[in-house]
Amino acid sequence: MKIVKVDRQCLVDINKANQPFKIIGKIKPEFANGIWTYTEEIYEQSNIKTYPDDTCVYADYINNPDKTIFLAYSDTECVGQIVLKRDWNRYAFIEDICVSKSARGQGIGTKLIQKAIEWAKSSDLKGLALETQDNNLLACRFYVKCGFVIGGVNTMLYKNFDNDEFAIFWYLLF
């Protein structure tokens, strides 16, 4: 497995790892005494969710000091990606991270987070930040395993959609 910084040749591989994933439950965050904690609610029946591909101009990420993309390859197959940008608050914001279904559980997501940490530190940023939905329990567990903590919850971000999702904001401080 190798991880490469996006260039013109590998632009065609962006979003290949964006594949359906399981929704098995959700986290239920609680804020008390200045600290976020959460419990998990496991659903009786899991379901599958798919995010649409982002519609960014990915060529803008090539050789850009304020944003970048790293792609993970197994042989010649793109099996993961992480999309990063320098945010105004001195965090590297993870706009997207995904690992293809066939490659999950092999440490690729962790290696992409490590690459994001390297990029953020070399860019003089103070941590990583990202947002995911409360019902993406497997992703939330992954972020906790990587050392992220909840920094906030937005109950209105997805209110205009026909769902019951909350946005969870995760942070990893260096």
Image (cartoon, helix red, strand yellow):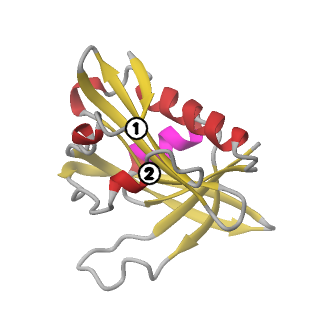
Q: Which amino acid does label 1 sit on?
A: Val
For marks 2 and 1, give the CA distance.
8 Å
Residue at (73, 50) in percent of width and height: 125
Q: Do the residues labelled 2 and 1 touch (CB within 8 Å)?
A: yes
Q: What element carries label 1?
A: loop
Q: Which of 115 and 174 is in front in this view?
A: 115
Locate residue 171 relative to residue 168 in the image: left or right.
right
Tell me residue 14's x, y (percent). 28, 43
Q: Quick check: can you spot residue 42?
A: no
> With respect to residue 173, does 157 lie above or below?
below
Tell me residue 109's x, y (percent). 44, 32
Which quadrant does the C terminus fall into?
Answer: top right
Q: Which amino acid does label 2 sit on?
A: Tyr
Q: What element carries label 2?
A: helix
Query: Which residue, given by chain and number where applicable, does mark 2 sit on?
Result: 61
Query: Which residue, given by chain and number where applicable, does mark 1 sit on?
Result: 6
